[in-house]
Image (cartoon, rainbow, N blue to C red):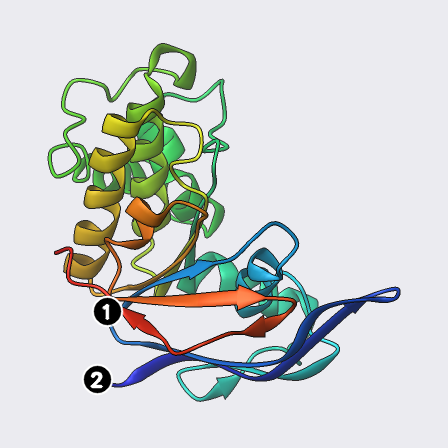
Amino acid sequence: MGTVLTGIGLVKKYASTTALAGVDVEVGERESLAVMGPSGSGKSTLMLTLAGIIRPDGGQVLLRGERIDKLGENRLSALRRRRFGFVFQFGQLLPELPAEENIALPLMLEGTPRRQAVAKARRWFAPLGLEGLEQRRPGQLSGGQAQRVAIARALVVEPDVVFADEPTGALDQSTSEEVIGLLTSVTRHQGASLVIVTHDVDVAAHCDRILQVRDGRITGPLQYTAAH
């Protein structure tokens, strides 16, 4: 299995607090990786650094062998739009747009004509069990439906890596199980890698591998799971 994303010796400090203390991490092709740890452990900082949202104070981030942490802001922003997908705890859908346009939005922001972008977005409704909801606005969707729209939005650009920050944190247990199952399966089917930050062991159990982070360091041996 090849490596898609690599962090080498990642260091990040906030005043006197060290959020990352020389972290090394690799994410493989089509791999799903869960990052776990207590509050303040550095797990979210690690994800945001790998995603090019936070610049490390030391170390390197490479996407398919290309160093991205030193890119200018315009190039880095374009890379995040084209090659990364994001799923957040509360979805962050635009309330005024119907589901199909929320999914199509990343394509339209890159200049794809609306008709073409929406047509591509509509292909995601059947695989994610969203048929008939194309015109529903976020306020008309359940929490689970909204997160499935967010998953489709993350994948519609055919990214190299999807980053998910507590993607089921606002859902009940049964809906959480359904959403995380869809997220891991459709991401793998799409050919993308997946990095999930979570405190939920049931969510992490759906992933190929688990990293434990504490005090800005990866602690202990990697744990492998067999939930899928």
At label 2, the amino acid type is: Met
The disc label shown at residue 22, or none? none
In the image, residue 61 sits, relative to residue 105, either above or below, namely below
Q: Which mark is residue 30?
A: 1
* 1 and 2 marks in contact (CB < 8 Å): yes
Q: Which element carries disc 1, helix, strand or loop?
A: loop
Quarter of the image with the C terminus is bottom left
Which residue is more in the foreground, 36 or 45? 36
Residue 136, position as x, y percentages in the image: 31, 15
User: Image point 39% across, 45% down: which residue?
Assistant: 200
Distance from the alpha carbon under mark 1 to that under mark 2: 9 Å
Task: Please determine whether, in this image, residue 106 is positioned above or below residue 66.
Answer: above
Residue 129 occupies quadrant: top left
Q: Looking at this rendering, what residue extends furthest in the front direction?
A: 220
Q: Amino acid at mark 1?
A: Arg
> Percent position (x, y) of residue 147?
35, 32
Q: Which image quarter holds the N terminus?
A: bottom left
Which residue is denoted by mark 2 in the rendering? 1
Left or right of 79 in this view: 121: left
Q: Position of residue 198 (x, y in %)?
A: 44, 49
Front residue of 23/135: it is 23
Residue 70: name its quadrant: bottom right
Residue 213 horizontal side relative to residue 200, left or right: right
Height in image: 83 above or below 187?
below
Residue 31 in picture, x, y percent from top left: 26, 69
Q: Which residue appears at 31% of the width and 70% of the height?
A: 223
Mark 1 or mark 2: name the one nearer the start of the chain.
Answer: 2
